[in-house]
Amino acid sequence: MVNVMKGVLVTCDGAMKQFLLHLDDTLKLGRKFIIQDLDDNHLFISADILDVLQAKIDDLMDQISFPLAEKGQ
């Protein structure tokens, strides 16, 4: 029997891949979402979790980024 899952190929650097693996291992998004760990820079993930994952990554980027200070005139 063939089992078919709709997924998305994700290309990322090593640090982002480790973050995604951590989210998957700790079920931070409510369930496992990585279908296959392909190589150092590629993951195959469930297509239906993409919006939630993007929001989580956006939140992380907002937390670690600093606003640029405007130069005084």
Image (tube, rainbow, N blue to C red):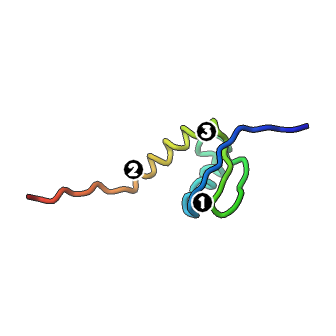
Tell me the residue that label 3 is attached to: 49
Q: Secondary structure at mark 2?
A: helix
Residue 18 sits in quarter: bottom right
Q: Amino acid at mark 3?
A: Ile
Query: In the visual, does 19 lie left or right of 5?
Result: left
Residue 39, given in percent of the width and then of the height, sits at 69, 61
The numbered disc on residue 62 is: 2
Screen quadrant of the N terminus: top right
Position of the C terminus, as image quadrant, is bottom left
Q: Position of residue 63 (x, y in %)?
A: 40, 52
Answer whether labels 3 and 2 touch (C-beta < 8 Å): no
> How dense is the environment of label 2, judged by Cα within 10 Å: few (below 14), some, or many (20 and up)?
few
Pinpoint residue 24: horizontal percent, then vertical percent.
64, 49
Residue plotted at (55% across, 62% down): 15
Q: Earlier in the sequence, mark 3 or mark 2?
A: 3
- What amino acid is at disc 1? Gln
Give me the C-alpha separation between circle 1 and circle 2: 19 Å
**What amino acid is found at the position of numbered circle 2 in the picture?**
Asp
The residue under label 1 is 18
In depth, the one of 57 and 23 nearer the eye is: 57
